[in-house]
Image (spheres, grey):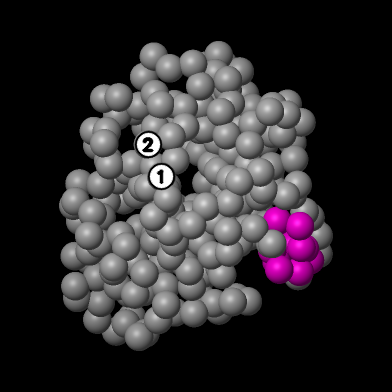
Amino acid sequence: MAGSEYHIKTIESAPFAENAYVLWREGGAEALVVDPSFDSDAVLEVLDREGLRLAAILNTHGHADHIAGNAAIREVYPDAPLIIGRNDASLLTDPDANLSAAFGMPLTSFPADRTVDQGETLELAGFTFEVREIPGHSPGSVVFVCRDLTPGFVLGGDVLFAGSVGRTDLAYGDGPLLFAGIRSRLFDLPDETLVFPGHGPSTTIGRERRHNPFVGENPGTYRLD
């Protein structure tokens, strides 16, 4: 996907159909990688093909399908810092907490180089992001909100999906907390803001505010809080 000022490439990987993202500014030389999963080779191929240097790895949260590629990416780009929300940082090095052990594939990442909290600002690879913490799917899921480009966008992890929301039946899950966070920390954004989720197609804030069956204005029978 290309905006007028930036590019976002989606890499979907098995076995969980997780979306990793590579993004860079139009004409820029640096890129960001978000939530590299099991297909790290495809992520590295994008960076190589576009001739981009990696400025940082961003993890929206610490579940296994979002951190599985951290080590392989760092091996090629040893100076790229890993950034994650402070309240999910412990999941990186704990196979039980990051759920990989439960799936019979225990894995860990190297520890975070930087942790972030609600309201912090990141300046990376020509992007400015506001960090918004929205727990409920994991203890400290964060989304990265870019508001000063056209169109604005959210790197949303497993918080809000097209027509759905992140699972809350896993360890540390909390449905009411997740739903409240979506409404207060995402639905205040402009309707045209793009949402790039951890699974499935992209969507917009306006579409989900109006029609999402869990947290939208008319959630109907799916409303759980």
Who's the residue at 64% across and 58% down the image?
Answer: 89
Kindly state the secondary structure of the residue where label 2 is placed. Answer: strand
Per the model, the C-alpha gap separating discs 2 and 1 is 7 Å
Measured as percent of width and height from the top left, residue 146 is found at: 33, 41
Measured as percent of width and height from the top left, residue 64 is found at: 68, 57
> Which segment did they paint magenta?
92-101
Residue 41 visible, this orientation: no
In the image, is residue 94 part of the stretch drawn in magenta?
Answer: yes
Q: Is residue 113 above or below residue 198?
A: above
Secondary structure, magenta segment, majority class: loop
Who's the residue at 24% across and 70% down the image?
Answer: 216
In the image, is residue 99 part of the stretch drawn in magenta?
Answer: yes
Q: Quadrant of the C terminus?
A: bottom left
Residue 121 marker? 1
Residue 75 visible, this orientation: yes
Measured as percent of width and height from the top left, residue 132 is found at: 40, 57
Q: Residues within 10 Å of mark 2 (few under 14, many from 20)?
A: some
Disc 2 and disc 1 in contact, CB within 8 angstroms: yes
Q: Is residue 104 above or below residue 20?
A: below
Q: Of marks 2 and 1, which one's residue comes earlier in the chain?
A: 1
Who's the residue at 77% across and 63% down the image?
Answer: 95
